[in-house]
Image (tube, rainbow, N blue to C red):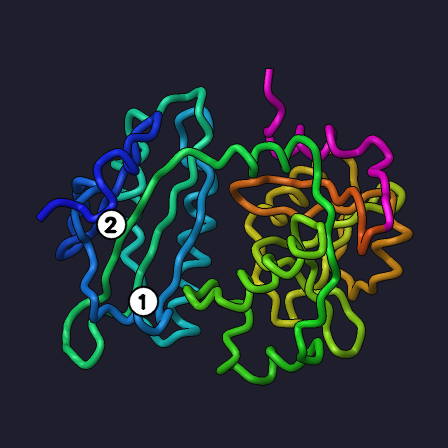
Amino acid sequence: MASRYGRGVFDTDPPLVVGRLLDGVPELVDPTQPVASAFDLGLVRGDGIFESLLVRHGAVRGLSAHLSRMADSAERLGMPAPDRSAWASLAAACADGWPSETDGVLKLVMTRGLEGLPGPPTCLATLAPVAQETLRQRRQGIAVRQLCLGVASDERARSPWLLGGAKSLSYAVNKAALRHAEGAGAQDAVFVSTDGLVLEGPTSTVVWASGHALHSPPLDSGILAGTTQVELFERAEHDGWSTVMVPTTPPDLVAADGVWLVSSVRGAAAVTSIDGVPRGDAGLTPIVHRLLDLLDG
């Protein structure tokens, strides 16, 4: 049966790549063909985990860190531990031949499998060019809105069923927050707890600079461990910066020399305004991009 979308939807440059693990063996498949069941719990319940990785200069960035976080997410959701070797082979197969001049987004997805039926997890991977809007935000920065997440800063840590710290497929709230921010004229959001602490972005980690130190909210608030934030802090320390995980308030972000939302694919996007109030970055964004190897040319 032909794809209901028509082959033209899949005619990107470079072409989309789709892969899967079948009995633990990686294979590439035709992107126009179905690879998941309508009964898959990832589709009907959002019951699963994923990772998004940057493919830059033809290489997958931070694969080991992402696979470690994927394993942590699986444990939090009570899912089988991902086979690191199989997933690494699948990632390599997808990225093989990807043009070095094009940034790509590689997504690794593992669901719990079919609803009400025994069987293994569904394991998929996709690779596509990074959206031009994402690249623009990396270069030019973003306006953000602060939004209340509706929980106290310690609630997710003491309530594991809320899946704090897990990168699950249940992203409806995250996407709703982004739509709300966009409706208010911004491009992204920062979640704030009911007790007034900065948490994270819907798809990113908050990093801010003051003096010659980089700061980020602590993981005990139930936020996702940011692979890019860890990489940035490690490289910054080698470059002579101090780094600290510290409880952060909205006034801290206002007073900071610079604020960035950092994530694997977009990298570091400088925050250019908060709740409609413009702010600068003290000329630090090129330094942050250099530390993350995101400078072009």
Answer whether residue 119 is magenta in the image: no
- Between 173 and 283, the residue placed more toward the observer is 173
Judged from the image, the secondary structure of the residue bearing numbered disc 1 is helix
Q: Quadrant of residue 139?
A: top right
Residue at 60% across, 53% down: 204
Residue at 41% across, 64% down: 169
Q: Which residues are magenta?
A: 277-297
Task: Tell me the amino acid under the disc marked 2.
Answer: Ala
Task: Please tell me whether residue 207 is drawn above or below residue 167 in the rendered image.
Answer: above
Mark yes or no: residue 101 visible: yes
Task: Please tell me whether residue 163 is drawn above or below residue 167 in the rendered image.
Answer: below
Q: CA distance from mark 1 to mark 2?
A: 20 Å
Judged from the image, the secondary structure of the residue bearing numbered disc 2 is helix
Residue at 49% across, 36% down: 131
Residue 81 placement, left or right of 297? left
Which residue reaches farthest left?
1
Quarter holding the C terminus is: top right
Task: Please tell me whether residue 201 is drawn above or below residue 242 in the rendered image.
Answer: below
Which residue bears the numbered disc 2?
86
Q: Quadrant of residue 79?
A: bottom left
Q: How many marks?
A: 2
Task: Tell me the amino acid under the disc marked 1.
Answer: Gly
Which residue bears the numbered disc 1?
42
Residue at 54% across, 68% down: 173
Mark earlier in primary sequence (1, 2) = 1
Label drawn at residue 244: none
Local crowd size for mark 1, using a 10 Å CA cut-off: few (<14), some (14–19), many (≥20): many
Q: Quadrant of residue 72?
A: bottom left
**Could you say where residue 280 lies in the image, as x and y percent from the top left?**
85, 39
**Could you say where residue 113 lies in the image, as x and y percent from the top left?**
23, 69
Residue 72 placement, left or right of 292? left
